[in-house]
Amino acid sequence: MTTAALDLAYPFTGRWLVQNSPADRVPSHGTTLFATSHAIDFVPVDAAGRTARFTAASLFQPEQPERFPGFGRRILAPAGGRVIAVHDGEPDHHAHRGFPSIGYATTQRMRIAAGWIALAGNHIQLETAGVVVALCHLQRGSVDVRSGDTVRTGVPVGRCGNSGNSTEPHLHLQALSGPDPDEAVAVPMTFRGGLPRNRTIVEA
């Protein structure tokens, strides 16, 4: 079982808001399912540190993902390694904030029951140093690599999307002991030797 933390580069440029960080709690997403104990989310924000402006319409109805400043922003390889899996066929659905997020939350069990793909959406699995790194919720049609490709740190691999179990465009990143999330265990991660806390903004 892998227990040592895997140090990664930030898989993006620009400003990103940290959510569900294991620096604040483990399991970071409130569950150990699918080896997510040490997963972390990054929400792209604008120069002022804001996501899409919250309006009266946001309170009552789902929103197009294109409204959000980071939708389509480049995602980079956080480490050098070999691409072992790619999935790029899921639609980018509407974002859910305000009251729509309550209805979306009620369908969470259905997505869990449907398995890893329903949660991860479009994603890449990259094997590096004996660990599998998964980059999830990518924009449909944006994946730039294929299974079997060897990539270097910082190479573009896709774009930020809103596929899978996602309430607004963001990147979900986790490290696993193996490629099957049903069998693997979570591997701790650091970024540039540290781990950012919730609600902080990181810039790369």
Image (cartoon, rainbow, N blue to C red):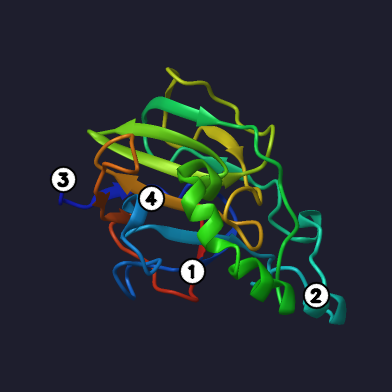
Q: Which residue is mark 3?
A: 2
Q: Earlier in the sequence, mark 3 or mark 4?
A: 3
Q: Which mark is residue 19?
A: 1
Q: Position of residue 81 (x, y in %)?
A: 35, 28
Q: Is residue 48 visible?
A: no
Q: Secondary structure at mark 4?
A: strand
Q: Nearer the viewer, residue 189 or 154?
A: 189
134 versus 19 height, above or below: above
Query: Are circles 4 and 2 on residues that touch, CB within 8 Å?
Result: no
Instruction: Indicate the quadrant where residue 16 lies.
Output: bottom right
Q: Position of residue 127 (x, y in %)?
A: 33, 31
Q: Looking at numbered disc 3 in the image, what kind of residue is underneath it? A: Thr
Q: Earlier in the sequence, mark 1 or mark 2?
A: 1
Q: Between marks 4 and 2, how big is the CA–CA gap?
A: 29 Å
Q: Which residue is mark 2?
A: 58
Q: Between marks 3 and 2, how big is the CA–CA gap?
A: 42 Å
Q: Which mark is residue 174?
A: 4
